[in-house]
Amino acid sequence: MTSQYQCTWHGAFRRALAFPIGLVLACASLSACGLDESGLMDVPTVTPPFGETVDATAPPAVDADAHAAPAAQDASEAEAAPPVVVPDARPPVVVVDAAPETSAPTACDLDGDGHRSIACGGDDCCDLDSDVYPRTTSAWFTRNTRCGNFDFDCDGRATQRYTEAKCTNSGFACSGEGFMGIVPCGIDGLWQTCAFTTPGRCEANPAAAATKSQECR
């Protein structure tokens, strides 16, 4: 009887000690994991400035200025960068001008037409007029030269461009035109056109005459 009672008492004593010890171990485990007795994570307390409320569970704020600074720095560096000069690979264009007909006046070329005077061994028969020099182009004038004549091509004579009217009758058509008579250089004359005045008669028609100046060189 006594032995049975002792065994019962010892068993109850051990069970009584097991609960507190288990409780202590559980609390120690919760403290080591950062959990309180309710099983929640221990969140650090943030002390806000006076008069403000801070939500510790909200995500951290992003500094917009810190992120915009590199972009502004890149823009300033782009503005400060010197321009890139790309060399032109095309060959230069060389413009070759024809020799000018006129040049600066000199003692032997007073009119500056590029032709030396006859007195200096040249071929310019009138070194006072830049329109007078030996030429092969068809240039005609109604004025005289500054030397007082109409010899613009220095061939020693005044050549008239237009002659007296000469009519040609082909039997089917009447053609031809010219001045009525001989007209000197620079003088106005009557310019006539040939036509059939009567049946079969081809001649200049005075009724259709017009005024025209005689050109020479």
Image (cartoon, rainbow, N blue to C red):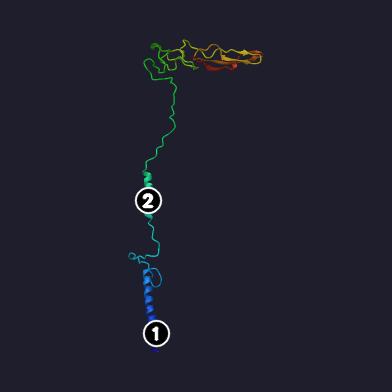
The kind of residue on which mark 2 rests is Pro
Pick whichever, 159 or 7, lies toward us: 7
Residue wearing tag 2 = 70
Q: Residues within 10 Å of mark 1 (few under 14, many from 20)?
A: few
Q: Quarter of the image holding residue 91?
A: top left
Q: What residue did someone put label 1 on?
A: 7
Q: With respect to residue 191, does 17 lie above or below?
A: below
The mark that comes first in sequence, 2 or 1, is 1
| Element under disc 1 | helix
The image quadrant where one finds the N terminus is: bottom left
The structure residue drawn at horizontal position 38% and vertical position 55%, both measured from the top left corner, is: 64
Question: Which mark, by number, is residue 50?
Answer: none
Look at 38% across and 53% down and name the residue there.
Answer: 67
User: Residue at image x 37%, y 44%?
Assistant: 79
Which residue sits furthest top? 156
Residue under the image location 37 percent in, 49 percent down: 72
